[in-house]
Image (cartoon, rainbow, N blue to C red):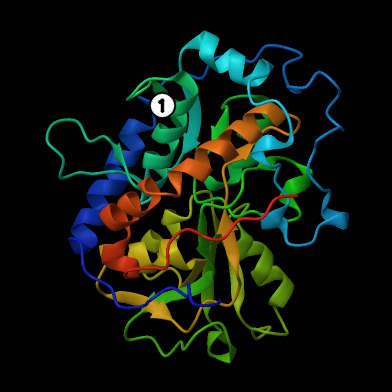
């Protein structure tokens, strides 16, 4: 990581008790989220020229995946995909509901806990701009980590705004916006643990990661080289937050996940902490259906404006308390 390396000074937020409330609420509210509208046939390519044109680079040709999105001015921003959202009058977004400070239900809010967080602010801003009204209608659909790509491909959601890292393999399956957040994989473990980071101290340790995550891919690739072969990486869960619960129950010794999420989890539970430095450079992007080129360009234009002021306001509200002052949004280049 460069100057945007995540800081490890953290503040508490209610500990394990609050965590249990969040998990319980997550299970209840998953049943209450709106049902996504079914997709219409033939609306995948905004330009009417086939999915191949304007699509993002395939993994085998991919270099710097965060720089592979379409420039806002590279073509239409108001094609069939954007028009469809306007016609329906709402935006359907796949989100998390238990990642503290990114997308979560706040148990301390008055009345029914509502979705809050950095990703939720961005999703709302995208909806407001596309639909042309303040507080536009958004259908938030809670999806687990391993369902992010399938939900897009099935057309269950218009987009996913859920701490989703842009990488070359995923560019084969979905399209991404330009990056809106920088992070890196990191180890989370109890403060009393002798684990020092993503290194030999993970020998004979039980490590948890989420299915479909960068963390799991990295663990598989590094087992027996960067980390000892004796490390047990067999604990794989649907949702990344489930790893924290496993850690609290003593079922695993460490969690590997995005450093930003790990910091938020450490803020929830003061008995755990980040171990070592981030060992990857990664960027979150808004994920959309491949070929939805008008929507990709429109989101990228919205992000241009969002980064000017609203990004910092949202960061200060949700993330500064756990990640420090920060260095602002990541620099952007387009394909």
Q: Residue furthest left?
A: 110
Viewer-closest of 115 and 323: 323
Q: Residue furthest top?
A: 87
User: In the picture shown, does residue 54 fall above or below 253?
Assistant: above
Name the quadrant containing residue 172.
Answer: top right
User: At x 52% / y 76%, what residue is drawn?
Assistant: 278
Q: Residues within 10 Å of mark 1 (few under 14, many from 20)?
A: some
Q: Please tell me how many numbered marks the rendered image carries.
A: 1
Viewer-closest of 29 and 62: 62
Viewer-closest of 122 and 12: 122
User: At x 30% / y 63%, what residue is drawn?
Assistant: 320
**Relative horizontal placement of residue 285, taking residue 103 as reference (left or right):** right
Q: Is residue 216 visible?
A: yes
**Relative horizontal placement of residue 232, taking residue 89 as reference (left or right):** right
User: At x 78% / y 43%, what residue is drawn?
Assistant: 56
User: In the picture shown, does residue 263 fall above or below 212?
Assistant: below
Q: Is residue 249 visible?
A: no
**Relative horizontal placement of residue 40, taking residue 183 as reference (left or right):** right
Image coordinates of residue 311 in percent, x first then y, are: 39, 50
Q: Secondary structure at mark 1?
A: helix
Image coordinates of residue 26 in percent, x first then y, are: 34, 40
User: At x 48% / y 55%, what residue is drawn?
Assistant: 240
Q: Which residue is mark 1?
A: 128
Image coordinates of residue 195 in percent, x first then y, are: 46, 87
Name the quadrant containing residue 70.
Answer: top right
Name the quadrant containing residue 44.
Answer: top right
Viewer-closest of 108 and 164: 164
Image coordinates of residue 276 in percent, x first then y, are: 47, 84
Quarter placement of the N terminus: bottom right
User: In the picture shown, does residue 132 fall above or below 325?
Assistant: above
């Amino acid at each position: 990581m460069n100057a945007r390396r995540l800081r490890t000074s953290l503040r508490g937020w209610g500990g394990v008790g609050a965590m249990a409330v969040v998990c319980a609420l997550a299970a209840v509210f998953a049943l209450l989220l709106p049902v996504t509208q079914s997709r219409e046939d033939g609306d995948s390519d905004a330009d009417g020229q086939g999915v191949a044109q304007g699509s993002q680079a395939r993994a085998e040709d991919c270099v710097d995946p965060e720089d592979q999105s379409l420039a806002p001015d590279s073509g239409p921003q108001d094609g069939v995909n954007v028009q469809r959202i306007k016609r329906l009058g709402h935006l359907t977004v796949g989100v998390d509901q238990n990642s503290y400070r990114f997308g979560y239900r706040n148990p301390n809010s008055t009345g029914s806990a509502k979705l809050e967080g950095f990703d939720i602010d961005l999703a709302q801003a995208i909806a407001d701009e596309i639909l042309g009204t303040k507080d536009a209608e958004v259908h938030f659909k809670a999806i687990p980590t391993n369902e992010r790509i399938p939900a897009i491909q099935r057309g269950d959601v218009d987009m996913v705004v859920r701490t989703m890292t842009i990488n070359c393999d995923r560019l084969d399956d979905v399209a991404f916006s330009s990056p809106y957040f920088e992070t890196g994989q990191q180890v989370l473990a109890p403060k009393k643990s002798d684990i020092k980071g993503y290194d030999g101290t993970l020998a004979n340790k039980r490590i948890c990661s989420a299915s479909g995550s960068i963390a799991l891919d990295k663990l598989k690739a590094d087992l027996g080289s960067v980390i000892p072969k004796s490390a047990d990486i067999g604990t794989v869960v649907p949702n990344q937050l489930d790893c924290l619960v496993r850690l609290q129950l003593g079922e695993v010794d460490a969690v590997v996940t995005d450093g930003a999420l790990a910091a938020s989890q450490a803020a929830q539970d003061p008995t755990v902490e980040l171990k070592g430095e981030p060992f990857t450079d990664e960027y979150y992007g808004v994920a959309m259906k491949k070929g939805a080129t008008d929507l990709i360009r429109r989101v990228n234009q919205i992000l241009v404006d969002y980064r000017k002021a609203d990004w910092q306001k949202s960061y200060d509200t949700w993330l500064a308390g756990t990640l420090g002052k920060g260095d602002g949004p990541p620099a952007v280049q387009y394909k």
